[in-house]
Amino acid sequence: MTTNKIYPDSETGCCPRFDPVPWDKKVIVLKDRLFMKEHVSSVMHIPVNFGSVMKRSMEKITSAGALSPEPLMLSDEKSLWGSDIYIAISKEVPGANNVRVSGTFLSRVFEGEFKEMGRFVKEMKGYVKSENKTMKKMYFYYTTCPACAKHYGKNYVVLLAEI
C-alpha cells in the first residue's frame, strides 16, 4: 500500500488501524509525556509543508530508535498561518526539540473530512461546557495519514481539550 514502513506490523506498513473506543469521551492524563516538537506552516489552517516536516521528523525519530510503540501526534493550531506538531517519542532525539507535555484532557473522537473541522471544534467546546469544565487549550490528534485513512475507510480525528 505504501513505501513508508514506519509501523511495519500494521496492515498498511504505515499508520496502525485506530480504535476510537479508548479515546471517545474519556479523561486523558499525560504526565511528562515525551514529544518531539516541530512547526508546520499553514495558510488558513491548511498545512503547506506537512509532508516534508513529517518525513524529516520521522527520519530523525527512526534513526534515533525513538519511535513510540503507540503513535500519538498532537497538533496545536496556534494561528491561521502555522501549527506546532508534537510527535510522541520513546526517548530523546539528538538535535531535536524534545519537550515534555503534562496535563489533563477531555477527549472526543470525530470521523469525517477536514472541511468538517469547524463543526468538530464547536461540538468539542459544547462537550467541555456540558462537563462543567473550562478549556485552557485544544489539541488535534490526527490518527492516520490521508493514504491510511483511505485504506481503512475512516478518517478519525481526536480533539483533546486541556482542562
Image (tube, rainbow, N blue to C red):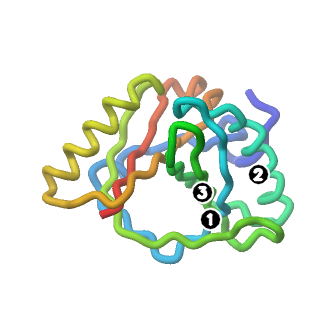
**Contact flag, marks 1 and 3 (Cβ < 8 Å):** yes
- Residue 84 horizontal/vertical position (percent): 59, 52
Q: What element carries label 2?
A: helix
Query: Which image quarter is the C terminus in?
Result: bottom left
Q: Which of 59 and 100 is in front in this view?
A: 100
Q: What element carries label 1?
A: strand
**Contact flag, marks 3 and 2 (Cβ < 8 Å):** no
Q: Which residue is drawn at 35% across and 47% down?
A: 21
Q: What element carries label 3?
A: strand
- Residue 20 horizontal/vertical position (percent): 40, 44
Q: Residues within 10 Å of mark 2 (few under 14, many from 20)?
A: some
Q: How crowded is mark 1: few (under 14 residues within 10 Å), some or many (20 or more)?
A: many
Q: Which residue is drawn at 83% across and 66% down?
A: 64
In three-dimensional space, the C-alpha distance between marks 3 and 2, rounded to whole angstroms, equals 12 Å
Residue 86 numbered mark, or none: 3
- Give the mark nearest the N terminus, 3 or 2: 2
In three-dimensional space, the C-alpha distance between marks 2 and 1, rounded to whole angstroms, equals 12 Å
Residue marked by disc 1: 35
**Relative to 88, is 26 on the left or the right?**
left
Q: Which amino acid does label 3 sit on?
A: Tyr
Q: Residue at x 59, y 30 (%)?
A: 43
Name the mark nearer the viewer: 3 or 2: 3
Residue marked by disc 2: 58
**Contact flag, marks 2 and 1 (Cβ < 8 Å):** no
Residue 10 numbered mark, or none: none
Q: Which amino acid does label 2 sit on?
A: Met
Judge whether 102 appears above or below 156 on screen.
below
Query: Which image quarter is the N terminus in?
Result: top right
